[in-house]
Amino acid sequence: MQSRQRSALKRWTMGAASVLLFASAMAIASPSNKWRIQVSSDADSDGVVVFHIAPLKEPAVDVSVAIPKGAGENQIAKLIRDQLRAKLGDNYRIEVDDGEDVLVKKRLGDANFDLTITQKTAKGVRITLDKE
């Protein structure tokens, strides 16, 4: 009998933890109308960066950007810009700023969006996201 109680308590605890994790992830989301992707340092290895674009009340989109070893921050910014444009089309204004930054802006009248990085395997490259 005690084993059943432990098992039930374990299931309840795991379920409660899942709910708290989901709720905290929702609290972290903070959509904006414009984001700045800042690229620092060169790529020490081949890799990929995956961006997750989640507009309010619309389906989210994942954009994968291949980063070659030795690519500099300006080249990486252009790769990110080009891949975002290819995947998102005319839904956003996407441009390189200051050589190593990428600006992603919603179109007038469109929903604000959240931008996160879900994967980064290119070594050496630092990418930070800032709301504008």
Image: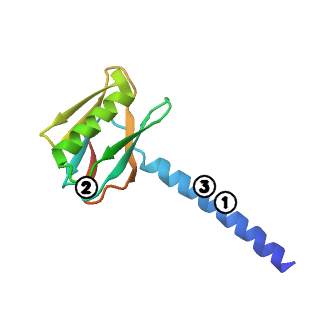
Of the residues tagged 2 and 3, which is closer to the observer? 2
Where does residue 75 sit, x and y in percent of width and height?
Answer: 19, 43
Where does residue 1 sit, x and y in percent of width and height?
Answer: 87, 78
Q: Which amino acid does label 2 sit on?
A: Arg
Work out which quarter of the rendered image holds the C terminus and state it.
top left
Front-most of residues 6 and 72: 72
| Mark 2 vs mark 1, CA separation in Å | 35 Å
| Mark 2 vs mark 3, CA separation in Å | 31 Å
The 10 Å Cα crowd at callout 2, few under 14, some 14 to 19, many 20 or more, is: some
Residue displayed at 45% across by 32% down: 56
Q: What element carries label 2?
A: strand
Q: How is the image coloured?
A: rainbow
- What is the number of the mark on residue 19? 3
Specify the farthest residue to the left. Answer: 98
Where does residue 126 sit, x and y in percent of width and height?
Answer: 25, 55
Residue displayed at 56% across by 57% down: 20
Front-most of residues 44 and 55: 44
| Mark 1 vs mark 3, CA separation in Å | 6 Å
Are discs 1 and 3 less than 8 Å apart at CB? yes
Q: Mark 2 points at which residue?
A: 126
The 10 Å Cα crowd at callout 1, few under 14, some 14 to 19, many 20 or more, is: few
Viewed as shown, does residue 17 lie left or right of 80? Answer: right
Q: Mark 1 points at which residue?
A: 15
Q: What residue type is labelled 3?
A: Val
